[in-house]
Amino acid sequence: MRFFTSLAILSLFFGSSALADSYTTAGDGTEWTMTKLAAVEGSGVTAEGNVFTMSNTVVVAKGDMFKIENGITVKMGKGVSMEIEGTASLNATDRVLFTRTAEGVAPGYVFVKSDDAVTAVTNIDFEYTGLKNFGSKGLTVDNCTFRYHEASSSGTSALNMAGEGAEFVVTNSTFEYNKRSAVGGAANASNNITIENCAFRYNDTQNLNYPQLNLTAAKSIIVRGCEVTGDRTKTRAGGIMVADLMGVATNPHTLIEYNMVSDNRYGIALYSGQTAIVRNNVLVNNNTETNPMNGGSGINVYDASNTQKTMITGNYIEGSLWGVTIVGGGDINLGKTEDPLAADYNPGQNTFLNNGNGGTIYDLYNNSANTVYAQGNYWRTATTQDQAGIEAVIFHKNDDPKLGEVIFMPFGDVTVGVKGTVSESNASNEVYTLQGTKAMGSLHGIGIVKRGNDIKKVIRR
């Protein structure tokens, strides 16, 4: 038996193409607002109170500045974009809405092309349109929403990342019901990004094999404290993917921690060469893929170059078609407890429950020729917590001599230390951190509501 997974689609970013007439400012140092643009004949911007309608693309030229006004609504026509080549100030205090002019109209993007400074984007709601960066500095996005984005030839994600050297920080924001990915990086560009305390819900509404987070590996990729919830009717929509399919990243590092990922085609996918840490995530029911040969992993490592180095620690993985699948890879470490002082020491502490398909449990499937360490884990599906019981939920060399061995003894016991994701001995309705201790305060926004022995949901604190 062999396990394969189809690669998610990544975009190539080459530039933008205008689908509407455009108006370009003079680049003479003017600070532009929507009110000022509406006062210019030929700009294509009209105003009615705090509502501004754009019938033309507006290009704020290099040397000029665009400043968002508080509490306004901007309606954008078909193919219409706001392109900011100069300095941008998109830091609103009262919420701003960018949306379409009418039902069925697909606007362009709000483009930031500035090379002058990092652009702050705060308290803005993007509906049917999206936010895209082409500048060399990047964006900080906080307390924004991205909904119903219409995929277009100029970008497939609600938040599109590009720009040589640009870096991104996205916090406290919500992405939902976008036609393809919520956040996407170019396959031919490597951009650092930190995503914290965000909610990703029901994206890839077109059901076209896009993950909700579609990230190209970079020097630093961090996804922390997020909720990633799929729509179970969208059987091709994945959770989190980090990939370097075109070999553009130099020394890429990935950190994915304290996230709740549920009801997607797969939970977390790491493709190609990178150094990754995946820890303290809750991955539940990532099983919407209809063909197990094409996906359905809680965590999937896919690396034909055999260079990926990944440490997987303290995760709770339940209800996937495959718990953890390893296809290639270099050093994939799910627990190595023999020497606490060793550089590759990993306490394990992953919990597996009911991951399987076709009537067979596959909590861990090593579909590589490499030896994989998976010590110190709690194999909750195993009928007995011993070598024979755990062997039955792992597929490796003992099942197919062409495959590498999984070294899983000694196993973990949740009643000792952390060892599972929560303390199984406590049956009261209390909130626990992913390390199994009672939550008293913030832990990157994640806690577990536990009723008896059932993990019900992850909450934001």
Image (spheres, rainbow, N blue to C red):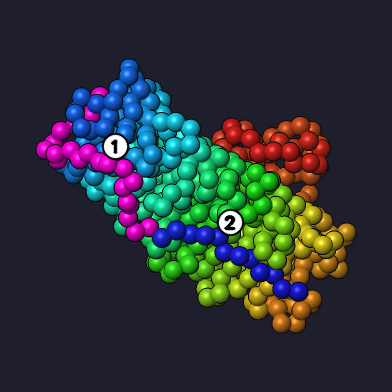
Q: Nearer the viewer, residue 335 or 251?
A: 251
In the rendered structure, which amino acid carries the disc numbered 1?
Answer: Asn
In the rendered structure, which amino acid carries the disc numbered 2?
Answer: Asn
Q: Is residue 304 visible?
A: yes
Mark 2 or 1 closer to N-term?
1
Q: Nearer the viewer, residue 422 or 398?
A: 398
Q: Which residue is painted at 79% across and 54% down in the image?
A: 354
Place residue 358 in its image quadrant.
bottom right
Residue 306 image position (x, y, % from top left): 55, 75
Q: Which residue is painted at 11% across and 38% down in the image?
A: 28
Residue 98 image position (x, y, % from top left): 40, 32
* Extreme residue in the bottom direction: 402
- Label 1 element class: loop
Place residue 20 in its image quadrant.
top left
Residue 28 belongs to the span the image colors magenta? yes
Image vertical order of residue 199 relative to residue 95, above or below: below
Q: Nearer the viewer, residue 441 or 400?
A: 400
* Extreme residue in the top direction: 49
Residue 226 belongs to the span the image colors magenta? no
Q: Which residue is mark 2?
A: 209
- Label 2 element class: loop
How many residues crowd mark 2 within 10 Å: few (<14), some (14–19), many (20+)? many
How far, Cα to Cα, is label 2 from label 1? 33 Å
Q: Nearer the viewer, residue 18 or 194?
A: 18
Disc number placed over residue 56 in the picture, else none: 1
Magenta segment boundaries in residue numbering: 13-37
Residue 351 image position (x, y, % from top left): 73, 54
Residue 194 image position (x, y, % from top left): 45, 48
Q: Main secondary structure of the magenta part?
A: loop
Q: Is residue 334 visible?
A: no
